[in-house]
Amino acid sequence: MNLYKIESWAVGYTKYPWVAGWGPLEQMPFFDTFPPVTQKSKIEFWEMNPRPPGLIIDPGGRVWSDVMGCGGGPPSFFVGERIVNDLQAEGIPSLRATEMPIAKNLSKALKNIPAPKYYVLEAEPGIRLAYSAMGLQLDPSGKPILVPGAKFPEAIYDLKTWNGADLMGKLAVFDSTIDLLCTDRVKNLAERNGWTNIEFKPVKVR
């Protein structure tokens, strides 16, 4: 079986728009899934740099895409309503889709083109990293021992821990609902329906 990490590659000033960052919403349940250090960093940044709630779109871009990459993540991308609807129609469940309004659009070409709704898409964690295959030592609780400053090795996933879902987050030191992995079923759906600005990066399994 093939597994892929979902990514978005466009970085402003190209055909598709790019999200420079985002401001906090009143309700953003996905935020509670971030590691504590990431939550703290985000909150401190917003205190120093207040932003309106929602997405800030960089200059550049000529066509609204189904996925918009984000340079101020996490999340690293936002998905359009067509993807959310296609997944539902195909019977591929997700955990949650939180709408992210566009707070500021700096793209001249897209100013007068209605934008689709965009979301933070989440999926239940459904597969565990194969730490031993990645060369990481484990502590007595089974968590990897991370050396400060050391580069994290390339991810390898343990297929025996897969929960059978076609769309999933990863089980790791900090379980993730926004770092999305998928099977060929989702990739084939994207190709069949022509989702734009999305990349399916193959990941290693054992």
Image (spheres, rainbow, N blue to C red):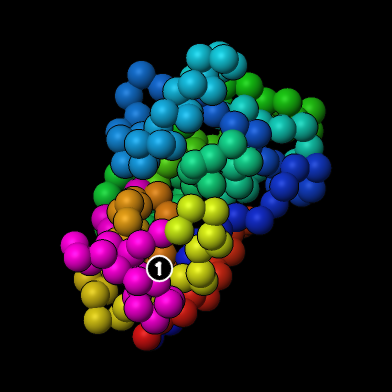
* Percent position of residue 82, x then y: 47, 49
Q: Residue at x 70, y 52 (%)?
A: 10
Q: Residue at x 63, y 41 (%)?
A: 71
Side of 77 where 71 appears, left or right: right
* Percent position of residue 18, x then y: 67, 41
* Percent position of residue 16, x then y: 71, 47
Label 1: state its secondary structure. Answer: strand
Question: The C terminus is located in which quarter?
Answer: bottom left
From the viewer's perspective, is residue 102 above or below residue 189?
A: above
Residue 23 visible in the picture: yes
From the viewer's perspective, is residue 19 above or below residue 129?
A: above
Compare residues 205 and 112 and report the one nearer the observer: 205
Q: Residue at x 29, y 68 (%)?
A: 138
Question: The N terminus is located in which quarter?
Answer: bottom left
From the viewer's perspective, is residue 195 above or below residue 113?
A: below
Q: Residue at x 59, y 16 (%)?
A: 49
Residue 193 visible in the picture: no
Dot 1 amino acid type: Cys
Disc 1 residue crowd, few under 14, some 14–19, many 20+, Cα 10 Å = many
Residue 133 highlighted magenta (yes or no): yes
* Percent position of residue 152, x then y: 50, 63
The segment highlighted magenta reads 122-146
- What number of labels is visible? 1
The residue tagged 1 is 182
Side of 88 where 197 appears, left or right: right
